[in-house]
Amino acid sequence: MRVTIDHDRCEGHGLCTQAAPAIFSFDDDGELANAFADADVPDDLAPAAREAADVCPVAALLNEE
């Protein structure tokens, strides 16, 4: 599974960072960062990635199975 962030949609609510802190965090500039931007999300973190996408109020995350 791959996770992508639509930075144009992201409003920085941070719910994804709470649902999947091993995947999402904010960088020093306040932009959402994806620890697996150039790689597949490990299978054990896939449920958290799905939850993060589900809780995003602006649908800024896309999980590609």
Image (cartoon, grey):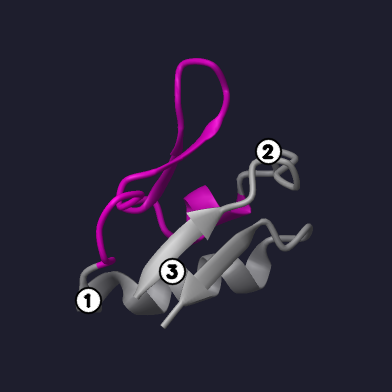
Secondary element under disc 3, as helix, strand or loop, is helix
**Circles 2 and 1: CB distance less than 8 Å?**
no
Is the residue 36 above or below the residue 51 in the image?
A: above
Does the magenta run of residues contain 26? yes
| Mark 2 → mark 1, Cα distance in angstroms | 25 Å
**Circles 1 and 3: CB distance less than 8 Å?**
no
Secondary element under disc 1, as helix, strand or loop, is helix
The stretch of residues the image draws in magenta is 15-41
Report x, y in % for residue 17.
Answer: 49, 49
The residue carrying mark 1 is: 44
Q: Is tag 1's residue or tag 3's residue first in the polypeptide sequence?
A: 1
Look at label 2 and name its amino acid.
Answer: Gly
Report x, y in % for residue 35.
Answer: 31, 46
Does the magenta run of residues contain 4? no
Is 47 displayed left or right of 40 in the figure? Answer: right
| Mark 1 → mark 3, Cα distance in angstroms | 10 Å
Residue 12 tag number: 2
Q: Is tag 2's residue or tag 1's residue first in the polypeptide sequence?
A: 2
Look at label 1 and name its amino acid.
Answer: Asp
Is the residue 56 above or below the residue 21 in the image?
A: below
The residue carrying mark 3 is: 49
**Residue for point 57% across, 23% down:** 30
Q: Quadrant of residue 7?
A: top right
**Circles 3 and 2: CB distance less than 8 Å?**
no
Along the viewing direction, whichever of 26 and 34 lies nearer the viewer: 34
